[in-house]
Image (cartoon, helix red, strand yellow):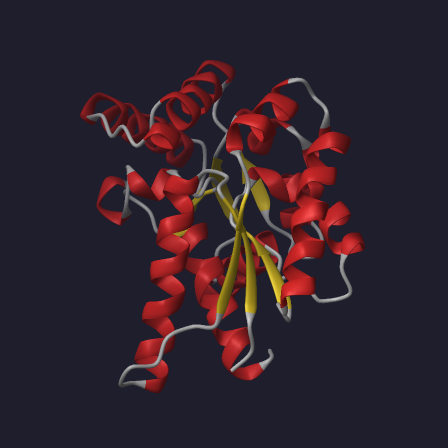
Amino acid sequence: MRTLGLIGGVSWESTVPYYSHINRLIKQRLGGLHSAKLILYSVDFYDVERLMQAGDWAGTGAVLAGAARALEAAGAQALIICSNTLHNVAGAVKAAARIPLLHLIDATAADIVQAGYRTVGLLGTRFTMEQPFYRERLQAPYGLVVLTPEPGDREFLHRVILDELCLGELRESSRVECRRIMQRLVAQGAEAIILGCTELSLLIGPADAIVPMFDTTAIHARHAAEWALTGE
């Protein structure tokens, strides 16, 4: 079994499911008392969030690049960033270490394409929904059509993620509003919904959508566990 290096703490609320998902998958595959070989570098999200809000993506990348180098030095054989938004600086992380970065967007896109969907609705932070790094990686080479909520709904989702979910707050009123946003995307042609924020799966799940839902946390963790076991 290979050793995975997790860049977490972004936020720690969603890093916990990563740890659980990966260990559960390893146990299912190998049985008995088996668990995953993991090294976790948990950053202080307060500092990272301030850099993101200021638009300092170079500074954000430098923080995660330092985490990547530390994980490689500690013996990690591959890296995963436990965040959708912070894949905006995946290039800086990849450049900082000689070990592979297992990319969340690639894992998600591969699952969507395999399932036969082409038009998807994307939920996430404002950065994920509005900046090109996520949409462009889904569009090429995977050929997906990406729909995002209208501006007011994007602001709502961003606030719920940072002011509620990252603080461990789960509000029924926010769940209801997320359902409405997803229904609007379906009305616009979305065949499936991407939970493009690792915290969103803490609040909503498949039962909240009228189309298939792709939980990036679970997908990324599954792909990471498979890599640890097979190197693929």
Give the quarter of the figure containing the C terminus: bottom right
Q: Residue at x 59, y 52 (%)?
A: 105
Q: Residue at x 63, y 25 (%)?
A: 52
Nearer to us in this view, 37 or 205: 37
Q: Quadrant of residue 157?
A: top left
Q: Position of residue 174 (x, y in %)?
A: 27, 24
Left or right: 143, with 146 as reference point? right
Q: Quadrant of residue 78?
A: bottom right
Left or right: 199, with 66 as reference point? left
Q: Position of residue 213 (x, y in %)?
A: 36, 49
Residue 72 visible in image: yes
Whether residue 33 is situated above or below residue 193 in the rendered picture: below
Q: Position of residue 230 (x, y in %)?
A: 54, 83
Whether residue 106 is situated above or below residue 194 in the rendered picture: below
Whether residue 161 is situated above or below residue 215 in the rendered picture: above
Q: Residue at x 66, y 30 (%)?
A: 131
Residue 193 visible in image: no
Nearer to us in this view, 24 or 113: 24
